[in-house]
Each structure stands twice: as C-alpha cells, then as structure tokens.
Image (cartoon, grey):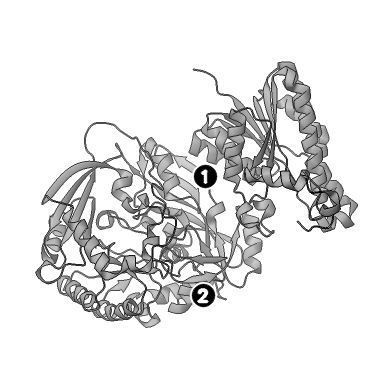
C-alpha cells in the first residue's frame, strides 16, 4: 500500500485551519496539528480519528517562542509534504494605533514569527526538492484601509514574503500557495458585523484551498468574488481612495 | 438576526452566540440575564426562540467511539446526520432516531426525541448514559442516573431550560446491515388501522401515514409502514447519506396549502399504493428520513408558516377520541398532509418527556385564524382524553392545557428553581407556558 502523505497544520484550532484539515483528512492525508490550546487540540485530534479515521497527532507550538521553531522542526518524526500556516491575530485597529505593544503584536504574529518558522521549512523543502507551503494571508493586505491597516500591513508583508518564496522555490519543485480569504465567519471575527453576502464560511475557504492545492494554484481569493472586488479596490486612484470609507 | 423554528411561525429577533470554548461559554452565560440553547432549529414552534440564544453548532466534535461496545460520546452540536456517516459503516446505528437526521445531540436530548420504534425501544434519552451540563452560574455538572439524577431526568426532555448541554455519551445499537425490510399495508379505515398496529406490534419500526381528506366510513384510511433490520446473512454496511436532494428556493405561495389542494394531495398519496400489501427492501435514509430528501419542505406551507399538532392519548377510548379529532378537522374544513399516527410504548422517568402509552398523531396545518381556532377545539378533546401535546412541536397551546397534561411539572420546577433560581434559561415557549 502506498504511504499516506502528511500535512502539517500550524494553528489548527483556528476555524479556517480546522476546516482545511478536514479537507486533507478526507483525502487520506496524515495530519500533524499544532496549536497553543492543548485541550482544544486534543479534542480536534480525537475528532479526526473518529470521524475520518485519520492518522493524526497533536503538538504544542507557541509561535511567539522564536527559539522553539528550529527544535520543533527537528523533533518532527517526518518532514511533512504539505504545511498549512494558519496562525493569525486580528488585534484591534484603534488599540494598534494608540499602543505600540498591540501594533507590534499584530505585526509579529501575522508576519515576523511566521517568516522565521516558514524559513526553516522552506530550507528543508528546498533541499528535499518537494513540498507545498500554504499560507493564509488576507485580502486586507491588498490595500491599506483605515479600518484595519495595521493588520493589513502585516498581511501585505506576509503576501509579499510568500510571493518571494514562491519565486525562489519554483526551481526546486516546491509549491507556495497564498490564500486570501475575505471576511470569514470564525472565532476571530465573531465580534464584528458581517458584510452580508460577502461573508464566507470557513468550509468554503477550505474547499477553495483544497482545489487550489490540487490544481497547483499560486494565489487564491476566497470566495472568488473577492478577486474581482479587490481588483477594483486596488485600482481606485489614491486621490479618491483616501476619501472613502470602505 | 431573525430566527424561527421549523414551522416558520413565530419569528423573533435574537442575538445568537456561538462558541466551542467552554471557558468562553462560561463567561457568556455569567453575563447573560437570559439565554436559551439552540441547535438546528428543527423544533417546530417557539421552544428554541428567545431574545438571546446560544447556538451549539460550534460544539461539533466526536469525543469517543468505543467500537467494541457501541458507546459514542460527542459534543452537543453534532448532528444525527454526521453520526450516521461515521457509525453505520462500522456496524453501529442510533438506537432511536426522529424523522429527520438534521437534529443535534443536544436537541435530541432536550426534546427526548422518539422514533418509529418507540413502542419497543423508548426515547433517545433512555440511551443517554451521561452528559455535561453548564448551569446558570457557569459551573459544569456531570449528569447520569447515578450522578445528579434529578438534573439528569429534568434535562432530558427539559427543552434546554436547565442549562447548556455541552457533551453527551450514549449507546448505539449493533447492526449487521444497513438494509431495511419494509412492508407497506393499505388500510381502509381507522378501526382497521388500530387493529393492524396491534397485529404487527412485533415489528421494530412501525408508523402510518393517514389520509385526512377521507371522511365518513373511509375516515382514517391509511398506509401502514412496517420495518425490520434485514435478517439476511448478507453483511452490508454501505451507507450513502442522502441529504438535500431538492432545495426549495422560496416559500410557496399561500394558495398551495389551501384545503382543496391538500385534499387532492392526500387522495393522490393514498392512491399511489395499488396493492393491499407490499414487501420490499429499502435503505436507511429512505425509510427513516423520507422528508429529508426535500431539504426545506417546510417552505411548501408558505410565508405564514404552519403548526404541527402532535398529541398522545391513552389506548382507552382511543378510537372514539381519534374520530372526534377527525370530525373537528372536517368541521373546520382543514386538511393535513404530513399526518403520522403511531403507537407509543411506556413513558419514562423524565419529568417533561412527551411519550406515554397510547396513540400519537401528528398533523401539519398552515397557520390561519381558522386553524388556530381549530387547535383550541382539539385541545379540549385531548385534555378530556387525558392526553397531551409535544412541546417540540408546539407554538400556541395555553399554559392551563400544558400544565394539566404534564403531571410531573411540579418536580421539574423544583429542580429548575434549585439550579436556575433566576430563571436565566427561558424561551418564548417556557414563558408562554409558565414552565
């Protein structure tokens, strides 16, 4: 029997990550789940074992502990075929404007720490000459808006990073996929007002991600309508854009 | 947002809270003055409706599956549809299932649901070993027949009024095949139907559809569906979940539910069976969940919504009482299409559970001034027959009628006031009925 492929989910307790993990489990991937909340993580592990008969293990990973990134990778019994990076922190825009610590936290969790962790994996994948890195960025990184530009800046950096990584690794048979979800109904956004029909469910993002993975896409907007919406938003002249509230 | 039950009546504006994190649920419960737990909103009336509802739909994890003994533990928001997909292929099936698989475990406990095998197996709640319940002070209690037994018996069938069920453990039944051997009998009138129920009481599953358009000597003509897990030696656990075959995109216009139309629909449904008796094999979903094939079948009743009137009455004078019911329906010129009669076995110890020994009849009627008047008339017949209505279906009965039908209400209230002294857990229904 052919051996299952392995998918590492970084930040598995997030709504989007859990939904993506389900897609990989349904497609017979073995799963390695990481997160901070061990109770929650163990529950997800158990659920996947019962529901999808998945080979599944859970590991504690504190993304803010930079020192631990290298050891985490070294302690994995197997270098995964696919990694999904789904750690993110929305923060609160007003608080980010007023307090450096909050702004720094938003930048670090969404960009600095992921950059370091993904560097380690990218180097290994490059050596092995195979693998897929899927990063969950956001449409917020496509253009800065007053509603969330600190978070948006961090996601813009992450998108640029993933783009560069894709460029670097394209000769090494390593795929890099950038997922740009719009407004997704998850724990992270439950205190916010939903934008009506633009609201996306985590399951939709997960399905789009799996499809993108299967078709080796580079950048995926989810839902798809965001691609067109963002195209328009990106092309509004700055003179006009600066006066808008969108 | 606007929320409503399966009957699309009534509607209420509600703030719905979701969470999968027990400590966050705790914080939420502590700061609320009022909340009612909710799930997939398959209860028909106002039992899950309130200004603040806590949705269990993020509590969606399987916790434990003991394949040896068929014991399953899940969080409260897991649906029967999800359970079927996991357990049937492994040779285990829900011990009791209602006519839709789109109910959550939490909802099934809160309604103490019954199925086509009630006369043999009882309710779903009778297979629940234990559950975790979050009380109004945010604390979490384990409930079973041994641990907090009073709370256990108040919560099963307790319509979410004792607290939030977080997770539950229950027993499944062993199956060899996912094939059902079905027998369908065409029945000429009510007396014959009741006699046939008696004659075939050994069947594990029995339920009848009932033609409410027939009057006089044909009154109560029916199709009796009997089912048994296939005993053939063929080991076959294939299960293809049939969900959402047809999706109704809009509410039907109100005239689609006028009596003439429904009369025709009834006659056609009865006439489609030609033979007096038909034996064949079928699959789980077709047998247990015929209506799930049309995802939003509740929309055929139009924007005004409908009420399902489901009562149980004792065997004593049942034929006479059922005839009285039918004659009231005839008098008001009303017709039901989804009409289901079945025999209930013994009642259980849960204070507010609906089933008790006798016949239960469920009928759907579009909401109108006339149908509401008719329900009041029917209530009188049911009350004098020592019967009662199912809380899960109800959206309109009076507090007096309810209280007369549920003799253990005083016990329930005792437990409720002990664990929820400020009546934090309440719904439109519990307020209307003074529970």
Q: How crowded is mark 1: few (under 14 residues within 10 Å), some or many (20 or more)?
A: many
Residue, disc 1: B63
What x and y, as percent, mark residue A184?
65, 49
**Compared to A52, does B37 lie above or below?**
below
Q: Which of A209 and B39 is in front in this view?
A: A209
Please state the total of marks drawn on the protein image.
2
**Compared to A129, does A66 lie above or below?**
below
Residue located at (77% from left, 39% from top): A63
Q: Which of marks 1 and 2 is nearer the N terminus?
A: 1
On screen, residue B272 versus residue B378, left or right, reads left
Q: Which of marks 1 and 2 is in front?
A: 1
Query: Mark 1 near mark 2, Cβ–Cβ under 8 Å?
Result: no
Q: CA separation, marks 1 and 2?
A: 31 Å
Q: How crowded is mark 2: few (under 14 residues within 10 Å), some or many (20 or more)?
A: few
Q: Is mark 2 on a helix, strand or loop?
A: helix
Q: In which quarter of the image is residue B223?
A: bottom left
What x and y, as percent, mark residue A199?
62, 52
Provide the chain ID for the residue under circle 2.
B
Q: Which of B431 and B328 is in front in this view?
A: B328
Q: In which quarter of the image is residue B5?
A: bottom left
Residue located at (86% from left, 52% from top): A239
What x and y, as percent, mark residue B365?
32, 69
Residue A86 in view of the camera: yes
Residue, disc 2: B417
On screen, residue B386 versus residue B35, left or right, reads left
What x and y, as percent, mark residue B261?
26, 65
């Amino acid at each position: 029997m052919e051996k299952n492929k392995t998918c590492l989910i970084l930040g598995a307790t997030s709504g989007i990550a859990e939904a993506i993990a389900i897609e990989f489990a349904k497609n017979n991937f073995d799963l390695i789940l990481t997160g901070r909340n061990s109770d929650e993580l163990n529950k997800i592990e158990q659920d996947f074992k019962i529901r999808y008969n998945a080979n599944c293990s859970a590991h504690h990973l504190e993304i803010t502990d930079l020192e631990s990134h290298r050891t985490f990778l070294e302690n994995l019994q197997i270098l995964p075929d696919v990694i999904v990076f789904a750690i993110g922190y929305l923060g609160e825009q007003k608080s980010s404007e007023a307090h450096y610590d909050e702004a720094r936290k938003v930048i670090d969790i969404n960009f600095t720490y992921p950059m370091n962790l993904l560097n380690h994996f990218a180097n290994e994948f490059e050596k092995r000459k195979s693998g897929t890195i899927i990063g969950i960025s956001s449409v917020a990184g496509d253009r800065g808006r007053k509603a969330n530009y600190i978070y948006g800046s961090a996601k813009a950096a992450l998108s640029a990073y993933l783009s560069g990584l894709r460029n670097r690794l394209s000769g090494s048979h390593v795929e890099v996929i950038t997922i740009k979800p719009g407004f997704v109904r998850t724990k992270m956004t439950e205190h916010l007002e939903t934008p009506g029909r633009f609201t996306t469910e985590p399951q939709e993002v997960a399905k789009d991600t799996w499809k993108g993975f299967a078709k080796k896409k580079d950048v995926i907007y989810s839902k798809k309508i965001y691609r067109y919406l963002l195209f328009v938003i990106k092309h509004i002249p700055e003179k006009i854009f600066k006066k808008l509230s969108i | 947002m606007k929320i409503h039950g399966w009957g699309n009546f009534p509607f209420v504006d509600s703030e719905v809270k979701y969470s999968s994190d027990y400590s966050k649920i705790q914080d939420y419960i502590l700061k609320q003055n009022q909340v009612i737990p909710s799930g997939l909103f398959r209860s028909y009336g106002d039992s899950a409706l309130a200004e603040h509802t806590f949705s269990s739909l993020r509590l969606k994890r399987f916790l434990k599956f003991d394949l040896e003994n068929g014991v399953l533990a899940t969080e409260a928001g897991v649906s029967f549809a999800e359970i079927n997909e996991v357990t049937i292929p492994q040779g285990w099936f829900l011990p009791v299932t209602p006519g839709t698989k789109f109910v959550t475990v939490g909802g099934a406990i809160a309604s103490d649901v019954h199925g086509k095998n009630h006369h043999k197996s009882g309710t779903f709640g009778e297979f629940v070993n234990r559950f975790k319940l979050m009380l109004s002070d945010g604390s979490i209690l384990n409930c079973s027949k041994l641990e907090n037994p009073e709370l256990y018996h108040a919560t099963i069938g307790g319509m979410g009024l004792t607290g939030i069920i977080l997770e539950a453990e229950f027993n499944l039944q062993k199956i060899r095949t996912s094939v059902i051997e079905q027998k369908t009998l065409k029945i000429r009138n009510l007396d014959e139907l009741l006699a046939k129920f008696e004659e075939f009481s050994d069947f594990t599953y029995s339920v009848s559809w009932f033609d409410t358009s027939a009057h006089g000597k044909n009154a109560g003509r029916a199709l009796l569906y009997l089912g048994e897990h296939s005993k053939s030696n063929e080991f076959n656990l294939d299960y293809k979940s049939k969900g959402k075959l047809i999706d109704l995109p809009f509410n039907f216009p109100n005239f689609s539910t006028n009596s003439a139309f429904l009369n025709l629909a009834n006659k056609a449904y009865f006439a489609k069976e030609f033979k007096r008796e038909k034996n064949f094999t079928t699959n789980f979903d077709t047998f247990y969940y015929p209506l799930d094939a049309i995802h939003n079948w509740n929309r055929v009743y139009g924007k005004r919504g409908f009420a399902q009137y489901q009562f149980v009455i004792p065997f004593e004078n049942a034929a006479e009482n059922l005839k009285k019911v039918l004659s009231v329906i005839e008098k008001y010129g009303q017709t039901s299409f989804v009409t289901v009669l079945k025999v209930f076995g013994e009642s259980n110890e849960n204070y507010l559970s609906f089933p008790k020994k006798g016949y239960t009849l469920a009928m759907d009627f579009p909401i109108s001034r006339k149908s509401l008047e008719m329900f009041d008339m029917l209530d009188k017949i049911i009350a004098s027959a020592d019967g009662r209505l199912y809380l899960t279906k109800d959206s309109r009965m009076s507090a007096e009628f309810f209280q007369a039908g549920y003799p253990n209400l005083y016990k329930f209230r005792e437990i409720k006031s002990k664990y929820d002294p400020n009546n934090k857990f309440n719904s439109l229904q519990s307020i209307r009925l003074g529970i």
